[in-house]
Amino acid sequence: MEDSLGVRIDLRSDAVHVKGPEPAVERVRQIFADFEALRRQGINPHNGELNALLRLVVADTSVTLRSLSDSGKQRSVGVKKTVQPRSINQRKYVEAIEQHDMVFGVGPAGTGKTYLAVAMAVSALNAKKVSRIVLVRPAVEAGERLGFLPGTLQEKVDPYLRPLYDALYDLLDPDKVEKLFERNVIEVAPLAFMRGRTLNDAFIIMDEAQNTTIEQMKMFLTRMGNNSRSVITGDITQIDLPNPRKSGLLDAINILDGVEGIHFCHFEECDVVRHALVQRIVRAYESSKPQQQELPLALGDAIEVGIESRENHPQPSHPAKPQ
Protein backbone atom coordinates (compact mmCIF):
# COMPACT_ATOMS: atom_id res chain seq x y z
CA MET A 1 0.00 0.00 0.00
CA GLU A 2 2.86 2.37 0.77
CA ASP A 3 4.39 2.00 -2.68
CA SER A 4 1.13 2.03 -4.61
CA LEU A 5 -0.62 4.87 -2.77
CA GLY A 6 2.44 6.98 -1.92
CA VAL A 7 1.94 6.94 1.85
CA ARG A 8 3.95 6.04 4.92
CA ILE A 9 2.31 3.63 7.38
CA ASP A 10 3.60 3.42 10.94
CA LEU A 11 2.27 0.50 12.99
CA ARG A 12 2.25 1.29 16.71
CA SER A 13 1.04 -0.62 19.72
CA ASP A 14 -2.24 1.26 20.01
CA ALA A 15 -2.86 2.72 16.55
CA VAL A 16 -1.87 2.93 12.89
CA HIS A 17 -0.37 6.26 11.79
CA VAL A 18 -0.58 7.14 8.10
CA LYS A 19 1.14 10.08 6.41
CA GLY A 20 0.65 11.20 2.83
CA PRO A 21 -1.83 12.96 0.50
CA GLU A 22 -5.30 13.25 2.00
CA PRO A 23 -7.08 11.07 -0.66
CA ALA A 24 -4.49 8.32 -0.21
CA VAL A 25 -4.73 8.48 3.59
CA GLU A 26 -8.52 8.17 3.35
CA ARG A 27 -8.08 5.19 1.04
CA VAL A 28 -5.84 3.46 3.59
CA ARG A 29 -8.33 4.22 6.36
CA GLN A 30 -11.12 2.61 4.32
CA ILE A 31 -8.99 -0.49 3.67
CA PHE A 32 -8.26 -0.96 7.38
CA ALA A 33 -11.91 -0.37 8.27
CA ASP A 34 -13.05 -2.97 5.71
CA PHE A 35 -10.46 -5.45 6.92
CA GLU A 36 -11.65 -5.06 10.52
CA ALA A 37 -15.28 -5.50 9.43
CA LEU A 38 -14.37 -8.71 7.56
CA ARG A 39 -12.41 -9.99 10.55
CA ARG A 40 -15.46 -9.51 12.80
CA GLN A 41 -17.52 -11.52 10.31
CA GLY A 42 -15.05 -14.38 10.68
CA ILE A 43 -13.40 -13.78 7.30
CA ASN A 44 -9.63 -14.00 7.64
CA PRO A 45 -7.89 -14.14 4.24
CA HIS A 46 -4.45 -15.73 4.37
CA ASN A 47 -1.38 -13.78 3.29
CA GLY A 48 -1.41 -14.76 -0.39
CA GLU A 49 -5.11 -14.02 -0.76
CA LEU A 50 -4.86 -10.77 1.22
CA ASN A 51 -1.97 -9.53 -0.90
CA ALA A 52 -3.96 -10.24 -4.06
CA LEU A 53 -7.01 -8.42 -2.69
CA LEU A 54 -4.91 -5.41 -1.70
CA ARG A 55 -3.40 -5.22 -5.20
CA LEU A 56 -6.91 -5.06 -6.66
CA VAL A 57 -8.06 -2.43 -4.15
CA VAL A 58 -5.14 -0.03 -4.60
CA ALA A 59 -5.30 -0.37 -8.41
CA ASP A 60 -8.98 0.61 -8.70
CA THR A 61 -10.57 3.29 -6.52
CA SER A 62 -14.05 1.87 -7.19
CA VAL A 63 -13.13 -1.44 -5.54
CA THR A 64 -13.20 -2.12 -1.80
CA LEU A 65 -12.26 -5.12 0.30
CA ARG A 66 -15.91 -5.58 1.26
CA SER A 67 -17.16 -5.53 -2.33
CA LEU A 68 -14.53 -8.08 -3.37
CA SER A 69 -15.42 -10.32 -0.43
CA ASP A 70 -19.16 -10.07 -1.14
CA SER A 71 -18.73 -10.92 -4.84
CA GLY A 72 -16.44 -13.81 -3.91
CA LYS A 73 -19.05 -15.23 -1.51
CA GLN A 74 -21.76 -15.04 -4.18
CA ARG A 75 -19.59 -17.06 -6.59
CA SER A 76 -18.63 -19.54 -3.89
CA VAL A 77 -22.05 -20.83 -2.85
CA GLY A 78 -21.85 -24.62 -2.54
CA VAL A 79 -18.06 -24.85 -2.98
CA LYS A 80 -15.30 -25.56 -0.45
CA LYS A 81 -13.37 -22.31 -0.88
CA THR A 82 -13.94 -18.70 -1.86
CA VAL A 83 -13.48 -18.02 -5.57
CA GLN A 84 -11.60 -14.75 -5.63
CA PRO A 85 -9.68 -13.17 -8.53
CA ARG A 86 -6.10 -12.29 -7.60
CA SER A 87 -5.24 -9.75 -10.28
CA ILE A 88 -6.91 -7.05 -12.32
CA ASN A 89 -7.02 -9.22 -15.44
CA GLN A 90 -8.44 -12.13 -13.46
CA ARG A 91 -11.17 -9.84 -12.15
CA LYS A 92 -11.98 -8.69 -15.70
CA TYR A 93 -12.02 -12.34 -16.80
CA VAL A 94 -14.50 -13.38 -14.10
CA GLU A 95 -16.74 -10.39 -14.80
CA ALA A 96 -16.61 -11.13 -18.54
CA ILE A 97 -17.75 -14.72 -17.92
CA GLU A 98 -20.68 -13.36 -15.91
CA GLN A 99 -21.65 -10.88 -18.63
CA HIS A 100 -20.91 -12.66 -21.93
CA ASP A 101 -22.02 -15.97 -23.43
CA MET A 102 -18.59 -16.73 -24.92
CA VAL A 103 -15.25 -15.74 -23.40
CA PHE A 104 -11.70 -16.49 -24.54
CA GLY A 105 -9.00 -16.54 -21.85
CA VAL A 106 -5.58 -16.28 -23.51
CA GLY A 107 -2.31 -16.11 -21.63
CA PRO A 108 0.69 -17.91 -20.12
CA ALA A 109 0.61 -20.87 -17.76
CA GLY A 110 -0.36 -20.28 -14.15
CA THR A 111 -2.65 -17.29 -14.69
CA GLY A 112 -5.77 -19.09 -13.44
CA LYS A 113 -7.55 -19.33 -16.80
CA THR A 114 -8.72 -22.92 -16.35
CA TYR A 115 -9.29 -22.83 -12.60
CA LEU A 116 -11.47 -19.72 -12.70
CA ALA A 117 -13.43 -21.08 -15.67
CA VAL A 118 -14.21 -24.29 -13.73
CA ALA A 119 -15.08 -22.24 -10.63
CA MET A 120 -17.51 -20.10 -12.62
CA ALA A 121 -19.03 -23.24 -14.16
CA VAL A 122 -19.61 -24.77 -10.71
CA SER A 123 -21.06 -21.47 -9.50
CA ALA A 124 -23.48 -21.35 -12.46
CA LEU A 125 -24.46 -24.98 -11.84
CA ASN A 126 -25.12 -24.40 -8.13
CA ALA A 127 -27.16 -21.29 -8.94
CA LYS A 128 -29.19 -23.38 -11.44
CA LYS A 129 -28.25 -21.08 -14.30
CA VAL A 130 -27.23 -24.18 -16.27
CA SER A 131 -28.09 -27.85 -15.86
CA ARG A 132 -24.71 -29.40 -16.74
CA ILE A 133 -21.02 -28.77 -17.26
CA VAL A 134 -19.24 -30.03 -20.38
CA LEU A 135 -15.44 -30.34 -20.31
CA VAL A 136 -13.55 -30.46 -23.60
CA ARG A 137 -9.84 -30.71 -24.38
CA PRO A 138 -8.00 -31.67 -27.56
CA ALA A 139 -5.88 -34.81 -27.18
CA VAL A 140 -2.68 -33.76 -28.91
CA GLU A 141 0.21 -34.18 -26.48
CA ALA A 142 0.56 -37.97 -26.65
CA GLY A 143 0.65 -38.07 -30.44
CA GLU A 144 -1.92 -40.90 -30.43
CA ARG A 145 -5.51 -41.08 -31.62
CA LEU A 146 -8.10 -41.73 -28.90
CA GLY A 147 -9.09 -45.04 -30.49
CA PHE A 148 -5.63 -46.53 -29.86
CA LEU A 149 -5.68 -45.81 -26.13
CA PRO A 150 -7.01 -48.55 -23.80
CA GLY A 151 -10.18 -48.30 -21.74
CA THR A 152 -13.58 -46.63 -22.00
CA LEU A 153 -14.12 -43.25 -23.63
CA GLN A 154 -13.72 -41.44 -20.30
CA GLU A 155 -10.60 -43.44 -19.42
CA LYS A 156 -9.10 -42.52 -22.79
CA VAL A 157 -9.38 -38.78 -22.22
CA ASP A 158 -8.87 -38.66 -18.43
CA PRO A 159 -5.12 -37.90 -18.68
CA TYR A 160 -5.80 -34.95 -20.96
CA LEU A 161 -8.54 -33.54 -18.70
CA ARG A 162 -6.60 -33.87 -15.46
CA PRO A 163 -6.19 -30.07 -14.96
CA LEU A 164 -9.97 -29.69 -15.16
CA TYR A 165 -10.50 -32.57 -12.71
CA ASP A 166 -7.96 -31.04 -10.31
CA ALA A 167 -9.96 -27.81 -10.23
CA LEU A 168 -13.24 -29.68 -9.68
CA TYR A 169 -11.86 -31.69 -6.74
CA ASP A 170 -10.33 -28.53 -5.29
CA LEU A 171 -13.72 -26.78 -5.33
CA LEU A 172 -16.10 -29.65 -4.49
CA ASP A 173 -16.06 -32.67 -2.19
CA PRO A 174 -14.83 -35.80 -4.00
CA ASP A 175 -18.09 -37.68 -3.34
CA LYS A 176 -20.11 -34.87 -4.89
CA VAL A 177 -17.87 -34.78 -7.96
CA GLU A 178 -18.28 -38.54 -8.44
CA LYS A 179 -22.07 -38.30 -8.14
CA LEU A 180 -22.18 -35.44 -10.67
CA PHE A 181 -20.20 -37.59 -13.11
CA GLU A 182 -22.44 -40.60 -12.51
CA ARG A 183 -25.57 -38.53 -13.21
CA ASN A 184 -23.91 -37.02 -16.30
CA VAL A 185 -24.29 -33.52 -14.83
CA ILE A 186 -20.57 -33.13 -15.48
CA GLU A 187 -19.73 -34.60 -18.86
CA VAL A 188 -16.43 -35.34 -20.55
CA ALA A 189 -16.75 -34.64 -24.27
CA PRO A 190 -13.64 -35.34 -26.37
CA LEU A 191 -13.27 -32.71 -29.08
CA ALA A 192 -13.14 -35.39 -31.76
CA PHE A 193 -16.62 -36.59 -30.71
CA MET A 194 -18.34 -33.18 -30.64
CA ARG A 195 -19.36 -32.99 -34.28
CA GLY A 196 -23.11 -32.90 -34.87
CA ARG A 197 -24.03 -32.16 -31.24
CA THR A 198 -26.03 -29.21 -29.89
CA LEU A 199 -25.30 -28.39 -26.26
CA ASN A 200 -28.28 -26.71 -24.59
CA ASP A 201 -28.42 -25.33 -21.04
CA ALA A 202 -24.73 -26.10 -20.51
CA PHE A 203 -21.56 -24.42 -19.31
CA ILE A 204 -18.91 -25.56 -21.80
CA ILE A 205 -15.18 -25.27 -21.14
CA MET A 206 -12.51 -26.02 -23.70
CA ASP A 207 -8.99 -26.08 -22.28
CA GLU A 208 -5.71 -26.01 -24.25
CA ALA A 209 -7.53 -24.46 -27.22
CA GLN A 210 -4.23 -23.54 -28.87
CA ASN A 211 -3.95 -27.20 -29.90
CA THR A 212 -7.13 -27.20 -31.98
CA THR A 213 -7.00 -26.89 -35.74
CA ILE A 214 -8.94 -24.14 -37.49
CA GLU A 215 -11.63 -26.65 -38.51
CA GLN A 216 -11.92 -28.06 -34.99
CA MET A 217 -12.27 -24.61 -33.44
CA LYS A 218 -15.06 -23.63 -35.84
CA MET A 219 -16.81 -26.93 -35.17
CA PHE A 220 -16.59 -26.45 -31.39
CA LEU A 221 -17.77 -22.83 -31.39
CA THR A 222 -20.89 -23.76 -33.34
CA ARG A 223 -21.99 -26.45 -30.80
CA MET A 224 -23.57 -23.87 -28.47
CA GLY A 225 -27.29 -24.25 -27.94
CA ASN A 226 -29.92 -22.23 -26.08
CA ASN A 227 -29.06 -20.94 -22.59
CA SER A 228 -25.44 -22.10 -22.92
CA ARG A 229 -22.18 -20.31 -22.38
CA SER A 230 -18.64 -21.20 -23.37
CA VAL A 231 -15.20 -20.43 -22.01
CA ILE A 232 -12.20 -21.19 -24.22
CA THR A 233 -8.75 -21.09 -22.66
CA GLY A 234 -5.30 -21.42 -24.20
CA ASP A 235 -1.70 -20.28 -24.37
CA ILE A 236 -0.51 -19.32 -27.85
CA THR A 237 3.12 -19.80 -26.77
CA GLN A 238 2.55 -23.55 -26.15
CA ILE A 239 1.16 -24.79 -29.46
CA ASP A 240 1.88 -28.51 -29.99
CA LEU A 241 0.46 -28.78 -33.52
CA PRO A 242 2.82 -29.81 -36.34
CA ASN A 243 2.22 -26.41 -37.96
CA PRO A 244 1.62 -23.75 -35.27
CA ARG A 245 0.30 -21.32 -37.90
CA LYS A 246 -2.79 -23.56 -38.21
CA SER A 247 -3.85 -23.13 -34.57
CA GLY A 248 -7.59 -22.65 -34.23
CA LEU A 249 -7.08 -20.29 -31.29
CA LEU A 250 -4.86 -17.94 -33.29
CA ASP A 251 -7.39 -17.99 -36.11
CA ALA A 252 -10.30 -17.28 -33.74
CA ILE A 253 -8.48 -14.32 -32.16
CA ASN A 254 -8.04 -12.75 -35.60
CA ILE A 255 -11.54 -13.50 -36.91
CA LEU A 256 -13.83 -13.14 -33.88
CA ASP A 257 -12.35 -10.12 -32.12
CA GLY A 258 -15.10 -7.49 -32.06
CA VAL A 259 -18.01 -9.90 -32.62
CA GLU A 260 -20.91 -8.98 -30.35
CA GLY A 261 -21.37 -11.41 -27.45
CA ILE A 262 -17.76 -12.65 -27.58
CA HIS A 263 -15.14 -11.27 -25.21
CA PHE A 264 -11.36 -11.80 -25.21
CA CYS A 265 -9.34 -11.60 -21.98
CA HIS A 266 -5.57 -11.50 -22.28
CA PHE A 267 -3.37 -12.42 -19.33
CA GLU A 268 0.23 -11.37 -18.69
CA GLU A 269 3.12 -12.58 -16.57
CA CYS A 270 1.97 -10.37 -13.67
CA ASP A 271 -1.21 -12.49 -13.46
CA VAL A 272 0.66 -15.72 -12.66
CA VAL A 273 -0.64 -17.04 -9.33
CA ARG A 274 1.46 -20.18 -8.97
CA HIS A 275 4.85 -20.33 -7.29
CA ALA A 276 6.71 -17.00 -7.56
CA LEU A 277 9.36 -18.78 -9.64
CA VAL A 278 6.78 -19.49 -12.38
CA GLN A 279 6.32 -15.75 -12.96
CA ARG A 280 10.07 -15.29 -13.37
CA ILE A 281 10.25 -18.26 -15.77
CA VAL A 282 7.46 -16.79 -17.94
CA ARG A 283 9.23 -13.41 -17.92
CA ALA A 284 12.53 -15.01 -18.98
CA TYR A 285 10.92 -16.80 -21.92
CA GLU A 286 9.08 -13.64 -22.98
CA SER A 287 12.30 -11.60 -22.93
CA SER A 288 14.09 -14.20 -25.09
CA LYS A 289 11.48 -14.06 -27.87
CA PRO A 290 13.21 -11.39 -30.02
CA GLN A 291 16.26 -13.66 -30.26
CA GLN A 292 14.22 -16.62 -31.50
CA GLN A 293 12.33 -17.31 -34.67
CA GLU A 294 8.64 -16.58 -34.12
CA LEU A 295 7.23 -19.76 -35.68
CA PRO A 296 8.73 -22.80 -37.41
CA LEU A 297 8.82 -22.71 -41.18
CA ALA A 298 6.01 -24.42 -43.04
CA LEU A 299 6.85 -27.71 -44.70
CA GLY A 300 6.89 -26.15 -48.16
CA ASP A 301 9.27 -23.41 -47.05
CA ALA A 302 11.65 -25.96 -45.58
CA ILE A 303 11.71 -27.91 -48.84
CA GLU A 304 12.50 -24.79 -50.85
CA VAL A 305 15.38 -23.90 -48.55
CA GLY A 306 16.75 -27.41 -48.87
CA ILE A 307 16.62 -27.35 -52.69
CA GLU A 308 18.23 -23.92 -52.85
CA SER A 309 21.05 -24.98 -50.56
CA ARG A 310 21.78 -28.01 -52.72
CA GLU A 311 21.85 -25.85 -55.85
CA ASN A 312 24.25 -23.36 -54.31
CA HIS A 313 26.44 -26.06 -52.78
CA PRO A 314 26.44 -29.10 -55.07
CA GLN A 315 27.29 -32.38 -53.40
CA PRO A 316 30.30 -34.39 -54.66
CA SER A 317 29.34 -37.24 -56.97
CA HIS A 318 30.04 -40.82 -55.91
CA PRO A 319 30.47 -43.78 -58.28
CA ALA A 320 27.52 -46.11 -58.40
CA LYS A 321 27.85 -49.30 -56.43
CA PRO A 322 28.23 -52.45 -58.59
CA GLN A 323 25.02 -54.50 -58.80
Image (cartoon, rainbow, N blue to C red):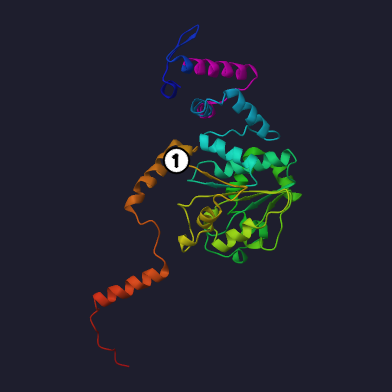
SS type, badge 1: helix
Q: Residue furthest bottom?
A: 323
- As for residue 302 lying within the magenta part, the answer is no
- Asked whether, in this view, residue 161 is left or right of residue 285, the answer is right
Q: What is the x, y in percent for residue 305?
A: 33, 70
Q: Is residue 244 above or below residue 288?
A: below
Instruction: Give the residues in magenta.
Output: 25-52
Q: Nearer the viewer, residue 276 or 299?
A: 299
Q: Residue at x 58, y 16 (%)?
A: 36
Q: Is residue 126 visible?
A: yes
Q: With respect to residue 80, does 41 lie above or below?
A: above
37 falls in the magenta region: yes
What residue appears at the point 58 percent right and 18 percent down from the top-left corner?
34
Write down the quadrant of residue 299 in the picture.
bottom left
Residue 121 at x, y = what percent?
A: 66, 43
64 shown above or below 223 = above
Location of mark 1 (residue): 269
Which amino acid lies under the numbered mark 1 shown in the image of this protein? Glu
For residue 245, side relative to residue 120 (left or right): left
Q: Position of residue 237 (x, y in %)?
A: 45, 52
Provide the major secondary structure of the magenta segment: helix
Estimate how packed mark 1 is, as few (under 14), some (14 to 19) or many (20 or more) residues with alpha carbons within 10 Å: some
Quick one: quadrant of the C terminus? bottom left
